[in-house]
Image (spheres, rainbow, N blue to C red):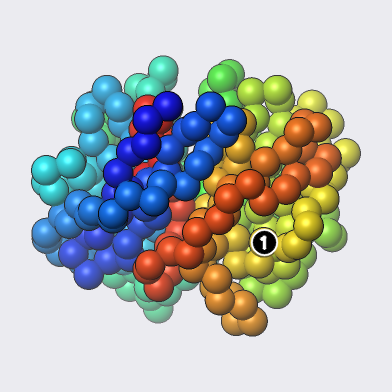
Amino acid sequence: MRQHARVAMALAMALTLSPAVALAAGGVKLSSDDETRIVAKGQPVYPEGIACDSVGKRFFVGSTRLGHLFTVTDTSELKQFSTDKRIATTLGINVDASRSRVVAAITDYGVGVRPKPEQSTNPAAVAVFDLASGKLLEFHDLRNLVPGPAHLANDVAVNNQGNIYVTDSLAHAIYKIDAAGDKLVLVQHGQFKGEGFTMNGLDVHPDGYLLVVKKSDGKLLKVPLDDPEKFIEVKLAEPIMAADGALLAGGDVVVIRNRTETATANEIVVLRSHNDWPSASIADRKPHTDNYPTTATLRGEQII
């Protein structure tokens, strides 16, 4: 398949998101084209998550500072999408186009302007918005699933049945919200614990399992959805320390690395498995030009 120009997106004074790559016949191949940027001018959004709405020809980005979801077009047009004032920070985002909804991980670790940081209630939640109107359809508070003061809902993924999966990077857990709205702890385990943020980016494999990166120690985990307690650590030649975003594309997992207190990477890594993910190798890698890249999204044959 033909190569695509790399694209990065910066929102005002916000974090620059990952450059694009191309899906080649054998999987993902990082592009060597010159980088171009979509710079959306406006208020500082400070996005963490990104998702593509192919039908609406736009990107959704969250905001660690403002809490709202925003849309961005290729022509740099930035628009506020959601309006719910309870939400301080949005992190991971998933566009569930078949159900006309946008799913976002909600948290508050003291950097959002709404509510005030001193009024933080340490939420771990998922908000579901109507894809067309931005109306809030559902708000799922997940804190009571794992008692304790430390929560951070980080990334979200949706499978073909409409089930939502959420990582909690401080409670060291993965939650599930089924299509009926019932909430449960999919799996929580001592191996998920670590220093700082732990369970982070995830995606759903069509064969019925999650692939999840653990930021604190660079592990990749395979979690079967029908028996999540039988998760395994995918064998890697080296730990992918500071792994933040994880995106399944072309059969590979594209990992966006940034930094932790002990490791600085700022890199894109392509992981590839030839045996259904008990093990994987590094198929490609490329330094990222930005200081703290976080995640990526798929648009056609491009990953942005």
View extreme (right): residue:
230
From the image, which quarter does the N terminus lie in?
Answer: top left
The reply to whether residue 273 is in sight is: yes
With 284 as the anchor, is 80 left or right in this view?
Answer: left
Figure quadrant of residue 262: bottom right
Residue 24 % position (x, y) = 49, 32
Identify the residue shown where x is 11% and y is 43%: 75
Near mark 1 (Cα within 10 A), the count class, few <14, some 14-19 or many ≥20, is: many
Q: Secondary structure at mark 1?
A: loop
Residue 223 % position (x, y) = 76, 39
Figure quadrant of residue 161: top right
Residue 287 % position (x, y) = 48, 64
122 or 275, nearer to the observer = 275
Residue 129 vs 243, above or below: the answer is above
The reply to whether residue 201 is in sight is: no
Identify the residue shown where x is 70% and y is 74%: 195
Residue 241 vs 133, above or below: the answer is below
Residue 152 % position (x, y) = 56, 61
Residue 105 vs 252, above or below: the answer is below
From the image, which quarter does the C terminus lie in?
Answer: top left
Q: How many marks?
A: 1
With 241 as the anchor, is 24 left or right in this view?
Answer: left
278 or 97, nearer to the observer = 278
Residue 144 vs 65, above or below: the answer is above
Judging by the rendered image, the residue that carries numbered circle 1 is: 240
With 184 as the anchor, is 301 left or right in this view?
Answer: left
31 or 184, nearer to the observer = 31
Identify the residue shown where x is 50% and y is 59%: 286
- At label 1, which amino acid type do we have? Ile
Identify the residue shown where x is 27% and y is 23%: 55
